[in-house]
Image (cartoon, grey):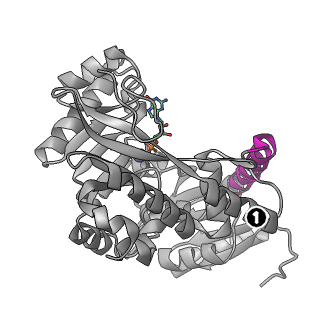
Amino acid sequence: MAATTDDRSKILLVDDDAGVLRAHTRVLENAGLRVEPALSGAQAIQCLRRQPYDAVLSDIDMPDMNGIQLLEQVRAVDLDVPVVFVTGAPSTETAIAAIERGALRYLLKPVEPAQLVKVTHEAVQLHAIAKAKRQALELAGGANKWVGDQAGLGARFNQALDALTMVYQPIVSWKTKQIFAYEALLRSTSPGLTGAEALLDAAERLGKLHALGRRIRLRANEAAATLRDDQLLFVNLHPADLIDDDLFSPQAALSAHAKKVVLEITERESLHSVPDVQRRVHALRDLGFRIAIDDLGAGYAGLSSFALLEPDVVKLDMSLVRNVEKEPKKLTLVQTLVTMCRDLGMQVTAEGVETPEERDVLLTTGCDLLQGYLFARPGPPFPEPKY
Ligand code: G
Ligand code: MN
């Protein structure tokens, strides 16, 4: 194994066929690349957790974890590393799945050595660009993206945690002109960590997502206590909250009002890093919580989240709502989702409704629970909607 000071590009090569793995390793090493061979998806994920790679080249057809599943898990660990598939059993289905999930290229076995090298070099270059872009973003972000050291960030984070506020936005039933629920939304106005995203980002970097989640639930619990009994409170969870014991404790603050609380789990982030998702969600239900899938239509998690979470409520992402009256394809998709969810006994809400035109078209699909600036902006407990 090369020394850690070696600055040659590192490639993670995954194939359950030891012969192919050896042959491809030799081709890439001869081209001056460093290669870490892995005989399974699980082994590849272990490697990725230990150190970053410049590209991942993977077979698709493998026992236990196939290449597509591996790709999803890779994204939970590394957002930027390019993934190239090399497969002997091509099908349109897997090709579509691969590209949809952000695979860079799709090569057919047997691969010409020159092509393997060329595509790998391209992937490495793209990775360098992706890394540079992220750094540029951090620089340009100024106030919102922290570029200083961990200790400084930690101090800012603690201040921001103490000062964090929650705002509340109503979800209304258009039919009854009643408030169905409020969604609790995180806000941070602390210097250096302005905005919910900056605060979440800092928590993630510092390994303090649990502390942030607990504080959010403490605040949400204070609000839940003052909410009318016929109104629900929607509270957003981060996937990391699902592995925090505090969430599952009957003594925890929010558990006292569990029957009034709907926990939102976003489709934007993968749940693959959470072991036993179904058991955990079951435990939350036993405490009295209801479960919502948030940002439906914006995530890469596909429909697998339905099977995992069996949600009580589904929230259509605002990207599906925006201009829905002008885009027939979008409308068809929304109609299909609303019908499917309702058939499964789930309540459907639409987020980010901004215009009467969007509202009216959504109503025709059977979606009656609506949230967005058209009714009320998020504000201190509890803004009154206008209908
Ligand atoms: O990820 P989640 O769906 O929980 O985030 C909701 C976010 O969308 C909140 O930050 C909220 O302020 C914002 N929001 C709420 N209503 C609207 C709206 O009508 N339009 C837009 N653009 N944003 C909205
Ligand atoms: Mn939400």
Q: Position of residue 346 (x, y in %)?
A: 18, 47
- Residue to which mark 1 is pinned: 155
Q: In this figure, what is the number of numbered marks?
A: 1
Q: Secondary structure at mark 1?
A: helix
Q: Nearer the viewer, residue 85 or 226?
A: 226
The 10 Å Cα crowd at callout 1, few under 14, some 14 to 19, many 20 or more, is few
Q: From this viewpoint, is residue 134 visible?
A: yes
Task: Using residue 281 as the reference point, say whether residue 230 is left or right of it.
Answer: left
The residue at the far right in this view is 5
> Which residue corresponds to the image point at 47% horizontal and 36% vertical from the top-left?
379
Q: Position of residue 179 (x, y in %)?
A: 26, 35
Task: Using residue 268 as the reference point, say whether residue 6 is left or right of it.
Answer: right
Vertical position of residue 300 compared to residue 361: above or below: below
Q: Position of residue 14 (x, y in %)?
A: 55, 72
Q: Nearer the viewer, residue 137 or 131?
A: 137
The residue at the far front in this view is 226
Is 123 in the magenta? yes
Q: Label 1 amino acid?
A: Ala
Is 382 in the magenta? no
Q: Quadrant of residue 367?
A: top left
Looking at the rendered image, the quarter that the C terminus falls into is top left
Vertical position of residue 108 compared to residue 382: above or below: below
Q: From this viewpoint, is residue 82 visible?
A: no
Q: Quadrant of residue 239?
A: bottom left
> Which residue corresponds to the image point at 22% horizontal and 71% vertical from the top-left?
286
Task: Using residue 152 as the reference point, say whether residue 166 is left or right of it.
Answer: left
Q: Which residues are magenta?
A: 120-143
